[in-house]
Amino acid sequence: MIRKNSEYPLQPPRESGTGRAFVFALVMHVLLGFFLYHGIQWQNSTPEGAEAELWTEVPDSAIPRLPPPPPVPVAPAPPLPDEKADIALQEKKRQQQEAARQAQLAEQQRQQKLQAQQEAEAKRQQQLAEQAAQLAAQKAAAAKQKQQQQQLKEQQQEQQKQAQADAQKKADEQKAAKAKAQADAAAQAKKLDAERRARLAQMQGMAGGAGSTGNGLAKSGTGSGSGGTATSPGYADKVRRAVRPNISWGGETEGLETVISVRCSPTGTLLSATISHSSGNPAWDDAALRAVQRSDPMPQDIDGKTPASFKITLRPAG
């Protein structure tokens, strides 16, 4: 059974004119059989002979005659093939060729389908491999990010611990410095109080002694000099005019009084300056001490020399 072309899209198209060619071949076979048949019949017919008498002089001896050759047997003409059998044979051969061609097409289609399946499977395997690689890369990136976050968290914790330790250390240092400052202030106040008492006792002793002299404390608003050794009456004003411009103070002024003991060379060079009596305000005490230090050298007395030691009482201008 011959299948239609629609079932096999790869089947080549039928050639046109096949029916006419088949009819033409059939007519030619019929004519060929007709001429073969009549040609064999013509060769089998015996031609009619003609009789004639010939008179000649015959010798006495009789000449034997050869008998005529026997007629050549003529092979009978082969029977004509059956046209229907030939057509059936051709049809069978054509069907076999068609079947072989259909089988070849089917094999080609099977091979193409198998190749397409193999290519699809290879593509699927490649996609699976790419997906696995992407998943592995994502996992690696996530693990790396997690590790970085953990490291960052640890660093932040370390920084927090270090900051807390630094803050605690700074607080301890400030506490220790404050305690030391308080202790130093207490010691200084105690020392100044002792010096003040000693000075008061000395002043009381000098006031009660016969023939004693002293310059006393100047009562100016900015500062004055008092003699630890004998000085002229106007020396305190000289000291006040020298120290006053160097005082830099912008705080409170009420009740502040600082006494500074100084030692100088005969030329006025300041050898030392210490607070002998604190005002109770460390900031003002420091400002007063800096003002005295900035007044180096100290002014000379009327004898051309600077007293070896004396005290300066400083109050902020108010």
Image (spheres, rainbow, N blue to C red):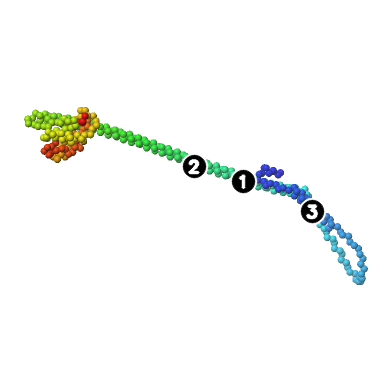
What is the C-alpha distance between the residues marked 1 and 3? 48 Å
Quarter assignment of residue 40:
bottom right
In the image, what residue occupies the spot 18% across and 38% down? 296
7 relative to 80 in the view: left or right:
left
59 relative to 209 in the view: left or right:
right
In the image, what residue occupies the spot 47% across and 39% down? 138
- Residue kind at label 2, given as amino acid type: Ala
Tag 2 or tag 3, which sits nearer the N-term? 3
If the image is split into quadrants, where does the N terminus sit?
top right
281 relative to 142 in the view: left or right:
left
In the image, what residue occupies the spot 78% across and 52% down? 28
Instruction: Identify the secondary structure beneath mark 3.
Output: helix
Residue placed under numbered mark 3 in the picture: 32
Instruction: Identify the secondary structure beneath mark 1.
Output: helix
Q: Which mark is residue 111?
A: 1
Mark toward the viewer: 1 or 3: 3
Tag 3 or tag 1, which sits nearer the N-term? 3
Residue 191 spot, x, y in % from top left:
17, 31
Q: Is residue 206 above or below residue 42?
A: above
Residue placed under numbered mark 2 in the picture: 133
Residue toward you, 100 or 285: 285
- Residue kind at label 3, given as amino acid type: Leu
Residue 256 spot, x, y in % from top left:
20, 29
